[in-house]
Image (cartoon, rainbow, N blue to C red):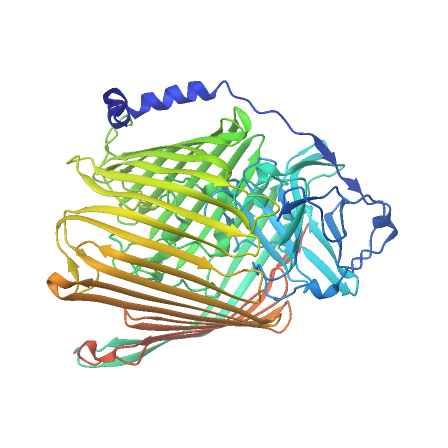
């Protein structure tokens, strides 16, 4: 950005650039794709996973194409996939043959298992046909249920939400000929719009054969759109269902929870620790009511999330907060509607701000959520009330989100309002406008503009001091020339308390250029690319570079299932205040210029035993760093899997004779008695915080909405003698039993 006029526009009048780009985008339109008419079942089938009914024999298999390892190559195994429906369900059936049954792999029975070492079969449904969000339903030869929601057109590092669950059924069988599956998904589990009984949804079906790393699909999906290309709703086939009308079921899910929590606290004299026993007996209620086929209301009274998986322990070698994903079920359905991304992990709304404070849970009295679609409008509303805790008053959280398809069927514009107000009158309000525009087949332009208002900051709506503007232009493909350019500017008073923002008062430029190859049938590589990355954060107040990165690298994925990358990065950091790695290790104020090397390698994911490894080495501020990570995973059988992580972090500062040393160790194991009953163990140790954590969860899930949990959590002090008086061995311990049963009416 060396042109002085261009620099002026981007740093002082970015709104002008935004208007000019919108005018340019207005002339680009996208054509509609050909539709596929789904077949209606004339009589009920025997739902047993055999796929033997006369009805199936009268259907034609969907036309299938190889997606990988060679796009549109010859399919190696006979496969027949049938899509049908009746008044209540969408059905997907598969005859998934093997010439040699020894090639079949089935390594898990766990709900929502996403493993490269087992065969999969299923579909992704863009029920609103918005080319941006979807719902996925898959199974394996073991008959497990995998369901997840897809957001942002499967663009990003992990653009699916495994915590989303809904009501559906699957049956499978295995013979010497192969394996066979029948799935039925209630229309009541899908939100859709019907036009006098005609419903159009985007659908992608596929079969994955782990032993061959082969994927075959309907429809044909290009393999140059990245690792998540098959999950993209924009690539789905438009499928029409006729004679389908909305129903309005109501789901009532009360729960009861009992147990004990033990905390070890200092006595009043601060001379010793004593145990405080808190016996728990809780009850609550979730209610889901369908206003229509495309609008639902969720009500929750005294929700509890004791069964939610604990967060991974991490070592933070940055000056900024860590971001953790949302795992609580209440926030999951169509959570993509509430996405208002501001680049990286930054966003205007971050649901973990509700019911979590200082890394601990806060009681939620209750809340309501409305999500749906009206015409081309996506609408989301959420309101929740939390209790007082410590120095934080009882607080109300409200969010309103609107989005509308615009210009073409792959683009939208939208807005969001967030509001947080507590019992003491403190408030924080965020207002935002955003949009994503498909400019050509692979090119997308995105803009985000947000402002925040709170007690001490009430500037005019036209001020940039309390605002953030982000512009992004990217090419969404991995073959040939690609790019991802972005610009962000954040004012000194921008503070989204209901969101997540790493930095304040900066202007950022970036990001990435690459050239990618898909070598073809005779190469051992599936794809690879070389890339160049550059970004800079400039402090608005001083116009000095706060952080910058400049790097080159190469990444690859092979047809054997291995993948990895190497990159070399030069970093510049300007510290205006001391940076504390720990209580004993501090990086002082100053200007730092250093270089780091990073490499990762993952062994083939299709094997029952695989290893992820990472290495980071080089200089670090005025010291040296070494990070080694290794993560083995072993599918012992379809009933037992074991995984581990170990990270060694060492930073040396020879000039100050300071050393920061941290070990992170995690051990996971899951024993699956069948697809309904499982026992999971998770152990963690973080030497930086001198804490060891244990989590044990027994889950019985005979059907969706009927859950029984026994949960045990324990936190241990791994260095009891770091403080006086001597710390107790156990910091806290919890044993809880929770049961939820869902009643369904009006199906």
Q: Quadrant of residue 449?
A: top left
Taking 282 as reference, is 703 left or right? Answer: right
Give percent across and percent down for residue 650. Answer: 26, 65
Q: Is residue 688 above or below residue 354?
A: below
498 displayed left or right of 188: left
In the picture shown, does residue 167 fall above or below 466? below
Residue at the far front in the pictured view: 522
Q: Is residue 726 left or right of residue 376?
A: left
Identify which residue, 690 or 47, lies in the foreground: 690
Image coordinates for residue 196, horizontal then vertical, percent: 72, 31
Position above or below: 131 against 658: above
| Residue 293 % position (x, y) | 64, 41
On the question of residue 409 being in view, the answer is yes
Quadrant (top left, top right, bottom left, bottom right) of the N terminus? top left
Q: Position of residue 226 (x, y in %)?
A: 52, 43
Residue at x 28% of width, y 53% of height: 596
Q: Is residue 476 visible?
A: no
């Amino acid at each position: 950005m060396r042109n002085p006029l261009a620099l002026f526009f981007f740093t002082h009048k970015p709104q002008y650039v935004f208007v000019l780009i919108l005018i340019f985008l207005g002339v680009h339109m996208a054509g509609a794709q050909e539709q596929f008419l789904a077949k209606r079942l004339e009589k009920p089938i025997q739902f047993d996973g055999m796929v033997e009914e006369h009805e199936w024999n009268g259907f034609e298999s969907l036309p299938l194409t190889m997606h990988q390892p060679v796009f549109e190559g010859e399919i190696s195994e006979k496969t027949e996939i049938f899509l049908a429906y009746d008044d209540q369900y969408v059905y997907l059936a598969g005859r998934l043959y093997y010439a040699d049954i020894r090639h079949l792999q089935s390594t898990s029975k766990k709900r929502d298992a996403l493993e490269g070492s087992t065969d999969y079969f299923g579909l992704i449904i863009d029920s609103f046909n918005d080319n941006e969000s979807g719902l996925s339903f898959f199974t394996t030869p073991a008959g497990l249920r995998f369901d997840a929601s897809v957001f942002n057109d499967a663009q990003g590092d992990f653009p699916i939400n495994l915590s989303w669950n809904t009501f559906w059924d699957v049956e499978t069988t295995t013979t010497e000929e192969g394996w066979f599956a029948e799935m039925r998904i209630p229309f009541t589990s899908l939100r859709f719009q019907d036009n006098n009984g005609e419903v159009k949804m985007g659908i992608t079906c596929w079969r994955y054969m782990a032993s061959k790393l082969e994927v075959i699909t309907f429809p044909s999906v290009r393999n140059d759109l990245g690792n998540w290309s098959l999950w993209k709703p924009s690539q789905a086939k438009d499928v029409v269902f006729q004679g389908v009308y909305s129903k309005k079921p109501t789901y009532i899910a009360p729960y009861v929870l009992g147990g004990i929590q033990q905390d070890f606290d200092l006595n009043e004299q601060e001379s010793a620790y004593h145990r405080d026993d808190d016996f728990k007996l809780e009850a609550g209620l979730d209610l889901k009511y369908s206003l229509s086929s495309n609008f639902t209301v969720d009500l929750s009274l005294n929700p509890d999330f004791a069964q939610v998986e604990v967060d991974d322990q991490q070592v933070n070698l940055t000056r900024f907060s860590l971001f953790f994903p949302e795992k609580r079920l209440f926030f999951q359905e169509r959570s993509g509607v509430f996405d208002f991304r501001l680049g990286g992990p930054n966003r205007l709304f971050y649901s973990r701000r509700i019911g979590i404070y200082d890394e601990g849970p806060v009681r939620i009295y209750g809340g309501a959520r409305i999500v749906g679609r009206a015409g081309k409008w996506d609408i989301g509303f959420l309101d929740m009330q939390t209790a007082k805790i410590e120095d934080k008053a009882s607080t109300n959280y409200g969010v309103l989100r609107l989005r509308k398809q615009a210009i073409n069927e792959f683009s939208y514009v939208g807005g969001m309002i967030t509001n947080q107000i507590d019992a003491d009158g403190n408030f924080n309000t965020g207002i935002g406008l955003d949009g994503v525009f498909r400019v050509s087949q692979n090119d997308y332009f995105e803009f985000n503009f947000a402002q925040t208002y709170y007690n001490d900051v009430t500037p005019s709506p036209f001020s940039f001091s309390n605002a953030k503007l982000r512009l992004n232009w990217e090419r969404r493909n991995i073959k040939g020339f690609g790019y991802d350019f972005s610009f962000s500017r954040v004012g000194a008073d921008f503070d989204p308390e209901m969101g997540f923002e790493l930095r304040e008062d900066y202007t950022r430029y970036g990001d990435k250029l690459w050239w990618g190859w898909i070598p073809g049938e005779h190469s051992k590589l599936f794809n690879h690319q070389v890339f160049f990355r550059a970004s800079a954060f400039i402090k608005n107040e001083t116009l000095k570079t706060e952080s910058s990165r400049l790097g080159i690298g190469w990444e690859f994925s092979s047809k054997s299932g291995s993948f990895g990358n190497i990159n070399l990065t030069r970093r510049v950091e300007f510290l205006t205040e001391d940076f504390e790695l720990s209580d004993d290790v501090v990086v002082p104020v100053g200007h730092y210029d250093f270089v780091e090397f990073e490499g990762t390698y993952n062994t083939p994911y299709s094997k029952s035993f695989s290893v992820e490894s990472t290495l980071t080495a080089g200089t670090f501020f005025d010291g040296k760093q070494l990070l080694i990570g290794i993560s083995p995973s072993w599918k012992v059988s379809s009933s037992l899997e074991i995984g581990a992580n170990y990270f060694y972090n060492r930073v040396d500062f020879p000039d100050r004779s300071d050393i920061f040393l941290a070990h992170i160790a995690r051990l996971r194991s899951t024993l699956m008695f069948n697809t309904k009953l499982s026992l999971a163990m998770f152990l963690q140790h973080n030497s930086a915080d001198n804490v060891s954590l244990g989590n044990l969860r027994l889950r019985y899930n005979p059907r969706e909405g009927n859950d029984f949990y026994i949960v045990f959590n324990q936190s241990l002090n791994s260095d009891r003698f770091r403080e006086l008086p001597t710390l107790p061995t156990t910091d806290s311990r919890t044993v809880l039993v929770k049961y939820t049963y869902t009643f369904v009416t009006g199906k």
